[in-house]
Image: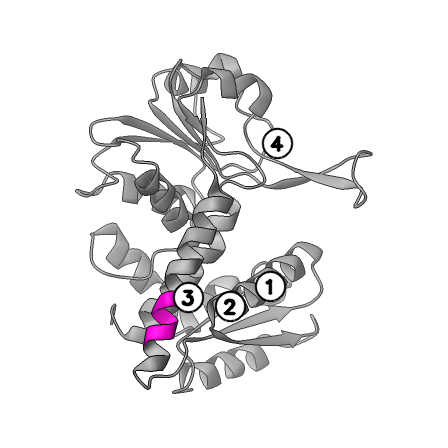
Amino acid sequence: MNLIDGKLISQQIKAEISEEVKSMLASGKRAPHLAVIIVGHDGGSETYVASKVRSCEEVGFKSTKIAFEDSISEEELLQKIDELNNDGELDGFIVQLPLPKHISEQKVIEAIDFRKDVDGFHPVNVGRMSIGLPCFVSATPAGIMELLIRYEIPTSGKHCVVIGRSNIVGKPVASLMMQKANPGDATVTVCHSRTKNLKEITLQADIIIAALGIPEFLTADMVKEGAVIIDVGTTRVPSTETKSGFRLKGDVKFDEVAPKCSYITPVPGGVGPMTIVSLLKNTLLAAKGEIY
C-alpha cells in the first residue's frame, strides 16, 4: 500500500508556482492577484478562506479578502461581482460557498466573468472542460488529476468508479477521467444515492473516487485487491480526542480499506491540500493569460 501524500505534492507545486512568480516580477510584470468573497461566518468557510489567503502569501500572490455579513442582499453581492469583473488589476476571484439561503448560488456563479472564474464553476468553463478545451478546471477535480500524474498512476483502459454526482467534484472528475488524455482514457461509471448493486460495481473498479460526503461509507468488502482509492470526503465528526472537539473523516473507512489498496489518499492530507494549489495554478494561468 502506497500513501498518496497530497501535502507533500502541494508543497512541491507551491515551490514551482513561487519560482514562476519570481520570474514574472523579474521581467517587470506584477504578481498574480486573487480575491475571495466570503458571506457570513460559517466556520468551515472561514477556515478555508484563511488557508487560501495564507497560501497566496506563500507563493508571492497578492490576495484580497472581501467579507460581508449574511444580511447582504443578492443584488449587493451581484454588484460587487460586477465590480471585480471589471477590475483590470484582478486576475481571478472566487465566492466561497455555501451562501445564505436568500442568495441564489447559481446566479452568483453565472455572474462571475468566466475568464476570472478560477474556481471553474461557470457554465462556460464546465462546458469547455467537458469537450476537452482549455479552461479553468474546478479545483478539487484538478487536484485529483495532479495526484494521479505525480504518482504516475496508470488510468488508460482502467475501470474508474466515481461515487457522487455533484457539480463540484463527481461530474467534472468523471468527465476528466474519460477524456482522451493522461490521466484519462478510463472507462467511467458514476454511482450515486439511487444506484442499485453499488458493491457489485465498486468491486470491479481499478480506481475509486469517493466524493459523496458520508463518513467511512466505503468499506473493505466493497474494494478489490490492488485498487487505487481517492477519498474526497471531509466531514467534521465529533471527537473527544482533539482540542477542537471534532476531527475530519473521509468517505473511506481508511484503516480497513488501506491494506487492500495499491494507492490511497488519507484524510486529512490527501486531496484537501491539492484543492488550494489548484486554485493557485488557475490564478497563475489567469495572470499569464494562458487560457483566454
Tell me: residue 3, above or below residue 235. Answer: above
Q: Which residue is mark 1?
A: 49
Camera-side mark, 1 or 3: 3
Distance, label 2 to label 1, CA atoms, is 11 Å
Query: Residues under labels 3 and 2: Cα distance?
Result: 10 Å
What numbered label is drawn on residue 215?
4
- At 20% from the left and 27% from the top, the residue drawn is 157
Magenta-tinted stretch:
19-23
- Quarter of the figure that contains the N terminus: top left
Residue at image location 21% in from the left, 31% down from the top: 156
| Viewer-nearest residue: 10 or 97 | 10
Q: What secondary structure do most residues of the magenta stretch adopt? A: helix
Mark 4 or 2: the one toward you = 2
Q: Secondary structure at mark 4?
A: loop
Identify the image quadrant of the C terminus: bottom left
Closer to the chain start, of discs 2 and 1, is: 1
**Which of the marked residues, 1 or 3, is nearer the chain's N terminus?**
3
Gap in angstroms between the C-alphas marked 4 and 2? 30 Å
Residue at the spot of label 3:
18
Residue 64's place in the image compared with 41, above or below, is below
- Residue 24: where, in percent of width, then height? 33, 77
Instruction: Name the disc covering residue 56, or none.
Output: 2
Q: Amino acid at mark 1?
A: Val
Q: Hey, what amino acid is under mark 4?
A: Pro
- Can you tell which of label 4 and label 3 is closer to the viewer? 3
Q: Is label 2 in a helix, a strand or a loop?
A: helix
At horizontal 34% and vertical 17% (from top left) the residue drawn is 204
* Label 4–label 3 contact, CB within 8 A: no
Q: Nearer the viewer, mark 4 or mark 1?
A: 1
Q: Is residue 64 left or right of residue 22?
A: right
Left or right of 162 in this view: 273: right
- Asked if disc 3 and disc 2 are in contact, CB closer than 8 Å, the reply is no
